[in-house]
Image: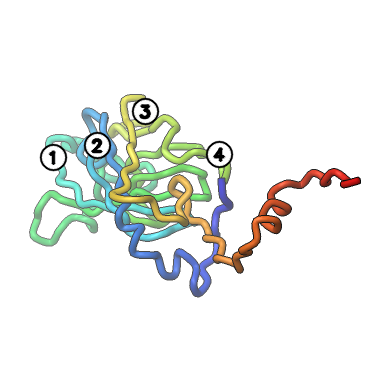
Amino acid sequence: GAGVATGRVAGSPEADPPPELRCVTIEIAGRHGFNAAAVNGLWRFWRVRCGRLAFTRTADLDPADHEGHPDDGGAEGGVAATEAQRPQDGGSSVKLFLHYSAQVDAWMISDAPNTTCTIIADCGPVGGAAGHDLEQHWRVWDGEAWKEDRNVTAEVRVDGPPPPNLQGLRVVPVAPAGPRHSGSRERARSQDCRPSPRQP
């Protein structure tokens, strides 16, 4: 695996994500019951955060899923959306984010892409830079407590050839193309680190 970028510098993947990253989506499925509408669905590339791709989608919420569960607006909020996230027209949809948090080494589904969000579900710990993204068991807020849900699965989809700077869901620098050596002797020498036999 690759290291996790923590800063934002000019020319970095976080400052100017390449357009080919838009071909990456994630399909999450398998959640039933409370917060199913928030967890299940197709997540589209949004931007690069913490050196990994981050995704977003708008979820249509079923009011029946949230009756009798007040939202306290904190990290353990009881519903998928805060009142501030609900549309002005009184509709029942909310913009959600699927992103990696280095602070907790986990993927999170939340109503905002920062640390003041209401977390709906998480998947981790990933294992830092050497870990595999979205392969751990998911925990979902069920309105009363965090419950592990082994039915939840995440499938990463790439429409077309994968971008060269993508390793799993990590964005890594692509080595610049250096000068090419045309001689096969030079190429063979660089590939074989054993000493060459002495000629008589």
Q: Are marks 1 and 3 in contact (CB under 8 Å)?
A: no
Q: Residues within 10 Å of mark 3 (few under 14, many from 20)?
A: few
Q: Which picture quadrant has residue 139?
A: top left
In which quadrant is the N terminus drawn? top right
Residue 62 disc label: 1
Q: Nearer the viewer, residue 154 or 35?
A: 154
- Write down the residue under mark 2: 35
Answer with mark 1 or mark 4, whichever residue precedes in sequence: 1
Asked which secondary structure carries label 4, the reply is loop
Asked which secondary structure carries label 1, the reply is loop
Q: Are marks 2 and 3 in contact (CB under 8 Å)?
A: no
- Write down the residue under mark 4: 127
From the viewer's perspective, is the residue at label 4 or at label 2 nearer?
A: 4
Q: Residues within 10 Å of mark 4 (few under 14, many from 20)?
A: few
Give the image location of residue 42, x and y in percent: 24, 44
Mark 1–mark 2 distance (CA, rounded to whole Å): 9 Å
Residue located 35% across and 50% down the image: 161
Mark 4–mark 2 distance (CA, rounded to whole Å): 26 Å
Answer with mark 4 or mark 2, whichever residue precedes in sequence: 2
Residue 147 disc label: 3
Residue 164 disc label: none
Asked which secondary structure carries label 3, the reply is strand
Answer with mark 4 or mark 3, whichever residue precedes in sequence: 4
Amino acid type for the residue under numbered disc 3 = Lys
Amino acid type for the residue under numbered disc 1 = Asp
Q: Nearer the viewer, residue 3 or 159?
A: 159
Answer with mark 1 or mark 3, whichever residue precedes in sequence: 1
Amino acid type for the residue under numbered disc 2 = Asn
